[in-house]
Amino acid sequence: MDQTQIEHIQKRLLRERERALRSLGRHMVRVIWRMLEDGRVYEMR
């Protein structure tokens, strides 16, 4: 593997990580928004 291929793989992994974090953030916002709308508090299960 040359340096270019290594850099490409690193960038791809970074994009996948960023996409996963955005997805998690969207989910958390939906949960928090719903809690605020319903007037509920967070309960650990």
Image (spheres, rainbow, N blue to C red):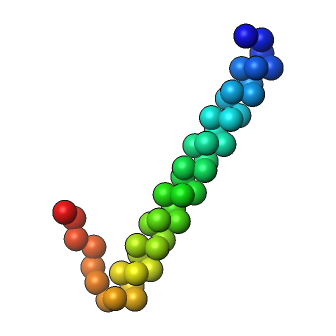
User: Would you identify the image quadrant in which residue 31 lies?
Assistant: bottom left
Point out the image quarter for the N terminus.
top right
Question: Where residue 43 appears, x then y in whole percent?
Answer: 22, 71
Query: Which residue is depicted at the point 61% across and 48% down?
Result: 18
State left or right for residue 40 relative to residue 36. Answer: left
Q: Residue furthest top?
A: 1
Query: Which residue is depicted at the point 67% across and 29% down?
Result: 10
User: Would you identify the image quadrant in which residue 33 lies?
Assistant: bottom left
State left or right for residue 45 relative to residue 34. Answer: left
Q: Is residue 23 above or below residue 6?
A: below
State left or right for residue 31 relative to residue 3. Answer: left
State left or right for residue 41 relative to residue 27. Answer: left
Q: Is residue 12 above or below residue 31?
A: above
Q: Is residue 33 above or below residue 45?
A: below
Q: Residue furthest right?
A: 4
In front: 44, or 27?
27
Question: Where residue 27 appears, x then y in whole percent?
Answer: 47, 65
Question: Where residue 12 appears, x then y in whole percent?
Answer: 68, 35
Query: Which residue is depicted at the point 46% across and 73% down?
Result: 30
Point out the image quarter for the C terminus.
bottom left
Question: Where residue 26 appears, x then y in whole percent?
Answer: 53, 65
Tally of numbered tags: 0
